[in-house]
Amino acid sequence: MDQERERIQADLRGLVKGDVRCDDVFLQLYSSDASIYEIKPLAVIRPRTMTDVVACVEYAAENHLPIHPRGAGTGLAGESLGPGLVLDFSRYMRRVLETFPDSVRIQPGIVHAQLNEFLRPLGRHFGPDPAMSSVTTMGSVIAIDAGGSHWLQYGSARGHVKSLQIVLADGQTMEVGREPIGERMADPQSRRGQLVSALVDLLRREEQTIRDHQPQSVVNRCGYHLTDVLTDEYLDLASLLVGSEGTLALITEATVFTSPLPKHRGVALLLFDRLDSAAKAVMEILPLGASACDLMDRRHLSLARESNAQYDLLIPAETEAALLVEQEGETLTVVRDKLAQVIDRVRRKKRLAFHAVQAQDREEIELYWRLARKVVPTLYRMKGSTRPLPFIEDLAVPPKALPDFLVRMQNVLKQHQVTASLFGHAGHGQLHLRPFLDLSNPADVTRMAQLAADLYREVIEVGGTISGEHADGLSRTPFIRQQYGPLADVFEEVKRIFDPNNIFNPGKIVNDDPELHVRNLRHLTTIALTNGAPANGTEAVETAAPAPQTWQLNWTGDEIAQTARDCNGCGACRSQLSEVRMCPIFRFAPAEESSPRAKANLMRGILTGQLPANMLTNDEFKAVTDLCVNCHMCRLECPATVDIPKLMTEGKGAYVLTNGLRSNDWLMSRVDRLSWLGSLVAPLANWAITNGPSRWFMEKVLGIARGRKLPRFASRNFLRIASRRRLTRPTRRDTAKVLYFVDTYANYHDPQLAEALVAVLEHNAVAVYVHPAQQSSGMPMISLGALGQARILAEHNVSLLAEAVRQGYQIVATEPSAALALTHEYPALLDDDDSRMVAANTSEACTYLWKLHQSGKLQLDLRPVNGVLGYHMPCHLKALQVGSPGENLLRLIPGLIVNRTENGCSGMAGTFGLQRENYRASLRAGRGLINSLRSPRLQAGSTECSACKIQMEQGAGKPTIHPVKLLALAYNLMPEVADLLSAQVEELVVT
Ligand code: SF4
Ligand code: SF4
């Protein structure tokens, strides 16, 4: 950290209660957002209170430093990026403060969807619905005047803001709304009075210019909003500030109006064989009063068909465009009639659509809305450097100009030989166009600038706006003068009135730099990291070693850099909604560094030389990598499928290679050795884990949380049992053959599980072989970055497993983490054919049994088992992408009622929840699951993962039983499992 940053950090830490970070790691995390830009700030501040915000503003004013307010960092135009102090409101200022019958008082960092979740039980919601509702903050919604698909019904944020608490550029605070003018005007000598009179004078003086230079589109949020804010009685200051992108004042609280939730709604999907037919249909639909009318082009629909078989069935390949139309109503009949009218008019009377369907069922409606909303992000799955870029993605034209404009738009794209994807809220003329370009190619950067200029000319000619609902930011500010002519001078004056020293988000909205939109583009060119051998196929350069001599995982060519670049910064991985599972760590610590995006940004920073290579071995870097527990959920759910866990494993590995493991991590990475030791002295170990003083000692020395219940040790481990039962000899039977990969938990803690699997397999005529030399999977080592040791284990296991596969065995593991290690982690550690062969022939136990059932080979002589279970799907099983085989097997058992709990991660995350420092966080993360298991309806839990079982039993106070054990019970192979169903939890895990 340089001296200036050190000084700023020390100064600000003395002034604010929130976080102040000026280190390289944090600055890298806040250098980018969802836009195409990257600018390193001077400092990141996460204020806790308005007083913190005031202190920052005063400090910035005194030291002539710019301030850039930021929410979730999902802006597409770079509006929250800048070289000054970034104020992140999303970390601490995220509360609902007060609720009124028709409004709600909020802090700016609250997430839009979370606000609506809070309002739902009250029968209300905040109407405007930006596409990234699951992560975008209300501060951002107000700062950019966001709209969304339901603009036709609710308009944009501006219409819903009652008043704002703001901090002005001199640090003064005030509540603003409709400010009286004339006789009731505030004291002209007061700051409020000065502000209001200066603005009133300006607006009156420039009334004609303001009126003459407005676009004709029904939506427009470009520049400052100066129309309709001044009447004879008041100046609507809150309305003027909405959409000002943090350039005039900072918002610290807001009172926003809420609306009643629609009673009923339904959607119609209209399919067209021409894009212009869809555009014409919009004008037919609008008089029928739709609440939403979204347009999707051919590319969007093709992607949807590829990603989901339901869409493939629904949308014929020849479809060129589709409109999704929503209607709301007091009754379902009203909704149905309204939709029928839309279909009748567009399809039968006007013959514009060739096909139409409608839905009123909640699930079906969601399916249709996902078609509109979830497909755009998946555009980023395309490999290579060419990407759909958001830089001209916020066009809006008058709806009646849509057919003409679409032709003009296609001509401009053709002229520049660029393809693009198109999605839009056609009902209000809003078009989100994303051209496919390669930002690392200078020719494409030039093309991008020309394309923007040519397209914006067309937009303005048809009376449209270059920015309908996102922001001007860095992408559109250079074109504001072209959009508004002399009105741009009035904007400059507005800015001077509020912020004479230009400290609030300078350069946005008011800026004459014609090249702003092509400066500060995100760094994508990778450098080599090693001293000597080029690391990524690029020229070797000297770096400030120590850096790893080579990557420790198996990456082909430029793959590691490509993986880091694949993250477009969309921020979807900051979601805390129950509909997704990523990221368990972000869920209970919703800070930027916890997010999967942060990890990609960090690695990209290192790979592109924005951070020194030796950062990999730095403790600040480790602090961020430690916030990944290798659950793999983001790899599955990220719309761009970025393999963050692999990047993090590599990053942790680099740290450990230089610094070694910390003592606690060392112990956790060898949890199998601890279990082995405990099992050797089981009576003593079982006493020790129940004894208060010894638990205190274990916490101090081993770092294992005192409050965490631990599983008992088995005095005879399963490998010994298997040897006695001669399972450790290969079978000579000519039958289906399985090699059981036992792993730590079943071996040392729960041999009953292993015996249940053997019994179930044998009952189904599958021969079982337990290789006596097998070792644990090493997953804890991999998750903690001890890759050298993990590789030794992997080589050992792969050599014996590969031989077994060659002899016709399938590998089966009862522990999902072990199955994931064998199928996913080993091939990344060992670049050889044997590890790939083992991976291809490994299954999790329930998956293997379910496949037997699917091929008609599973015995179905199952006896009834009476019970009601809550089934939890473990993350590592989900990561295997095999569906829900354990749950399916349970449903085969007569009498057993299975309720799937959909509450995300259990919070244990392998050994994470065992550790003292993570214990409480782990319980918090698993709260949803634990609460649902506590339901008196449920007798017990069921899951495949041993770590989840520990958490479920500890939290819910009920037994949790592996599906294979229940299957063994139902086959009457292990009647003793019945006792587990009624066991007191103390008998299962210990206090
Ligand atoms: S990791 Fe995926 S979800 Fe997260 S910001 Fe990057 S692309 Fe978006
Ligand atoms: S692998 Fe899991 S813990 Fe790690 S970043 Fe992804 S979602 Fe978060």
Image (spheres, helix red, strand yellow):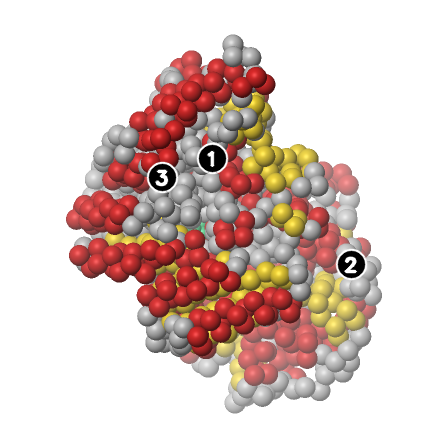
Pointer 2 or 1: first along the chain: 1
Q: Which mark is residue 214?
A: 3
Nearer the camera: disc 2 or disc 1: 1
Quadrant of the image occupied by residue 233: top right
Q: Which residue is painted at 24% across and 46% down in the image?
A: 457
Toward the viewer: 116 or 669? 116
| Image quarter in which the N terminus is found | top left
Q: Is residue 796 above or below residue 483?
A: below
Please, what is the three-letter code of the amino acid marked with disc 3? Gln
Pointer 1 or 3: first along the chain: 3
Q: Residues within 10 Å of mark 1 (few under 14, many from 20)?
A: few
Instruction: Determine the CA span between mark 1 and mark 3.
Output: 12 Å
Q: Which residue is mark 2?
A: 935
Q: Which residue is mark 1?
A: 228
Residue 900 percent location from the top left of the image: 67, 66
Q: Is residue 298 above or below residue 169?
A: below
Q: Look at the image and tell me whether residue 303 can be seen.
A: no
